[in-house]
Image (spheres, grey):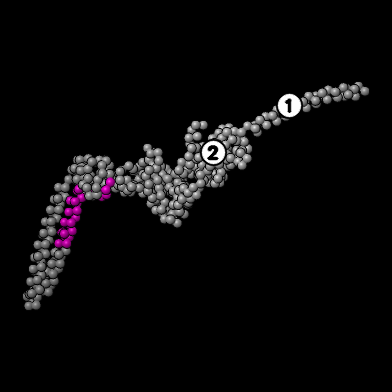
Amino acid sequence: MQLKKSCTDLRPRRAVCNKRISAIVGVISLSLASSTGATELQAVKVDVAPVLSKLVRQWDSFIGRISPVETVDIRPRVSGYIQKISYREGYDVRRGDVLVTIDPRPYQAALDSAKARLERARAAVLLSKLRYQRAQKLLPNRTISEDEAESRRAVYLQNQADVLEAEAAVKLAKLNLEFTQVRAPIDGRAGRAALTVGNLAIADQSLLATVVSQDPIYVEFDPDEQSFLRYSALATRHGIGALPVRVGLANEDDHPSTGTLYFVDNQVNPTTGTIRLRAKLENVDRKFTPGLFARVELADANETQVILIDDKAVLTDQDRKYVYVLGADNTAERRDVMLGQTAEGLRVVEKGLLPGDRVIVGGLQRIYASGTPVDASEVPISDVTRIGANL
């Protein structure tokens, strides 16, 4: 009986607690409803810009290096002591210009000696020829034996061969004398002199200087496999020379120099997954110096229709890129996008947007979720940069 009484006493208390809980829940519900209603009534002011759909030529960016078309290490063809250096280090030289002179006196003496041997051989030929002709006249009368006649003929032929050998020796001596003047084999810019006057230069060993060509010039870069496969297909259809290249140096904001693709290597580097490409550029004003790093852009052969937006409209959600577009009911609608390269200062959108979409470019910091009501003011895409700078 006592236990039942206790349970009976608890019932009024439970009723009171339930009433209080119901009252609290009601207050919270009213507050949430009031808050939601206020949000729905208040629209966020934003700026929207229509996407730009147009034909553009897309460019891929790479890092490259300037390299010369020709590089020659100047080495002497004859040994000797350096007598004179005839070029200015670091200046342009023309093909055939004398760069270094090796002491020519020993080689002049060798040439004079070779000429003397040639004259002696010619004199021996003349004498042996006369003796052979006399033997030919005496042989029918049996005044001279056949063995003697054949011997004179052999001496005559041998002396003729000696003349040929002496003539070859003279030619070689002339070449060695010419080689004492070391000439530039190409047009280009000469580097520093590795050996100065008075030093011994060893034939085919000593490095005298290096000459590198200046115009035209190469820029070499290494695209990845995906880029290579895409451009390889374009080169097959249009030809390798149809792919334009733009180049900019470290002190240039844009890519003012242009050229064409010139060379594609015959294999992909399995370690880096890249392949060497080379473009040829004009370098009349000597702006490019071999060894410089360069920013390289390689383009498609044809223009393609793409959708462009300003980068300021792009937001990031972990590893996904998205934008807000103006929905039909004046709300902010989230669209996940796949971005491409830049073109004409804008960003290419490969997937996620359609022509006619209007992207929110101003007031994005006041949009917290998709479906937020907005009060949109349309601006042209050319004003997006200015708007973004004022936010």
Q: Estimate the x, y position of residue 50 in percent, counting from the top left.
A: 53, 42
In the image, 280: left or right of 131? Answer: right
Q: Which mark is residue 146?
A: none
The residue range painted magenta reads 162-188
| Residue type highlighted by circle 2 | Glu
Q: In this view of the protein, can residue 314 be seen by the observer?
A: no
The residue lying toward the viewer, choosing from 192 and 173, is 192
Q: Quadrant of the N terminus?
A: top right
Residue under the point 72% across and 28% down: 30
Q: Which residue is mark 1?
A: 27
Q: Estimate the x, y position of residue 94 in percent, counting from the top left.
A: 24, 47
Q: Which residue is mark 2?
A: 378
Q: Earlier in the sequence, mark 2 or mark 1?
A: 1
Report the number of discs.
Answer: 2
To which quarter of the image does residue 152 belong?
Answer: bottom left
The residue lying toward the viewer, choosing from 117 and 77, is 77
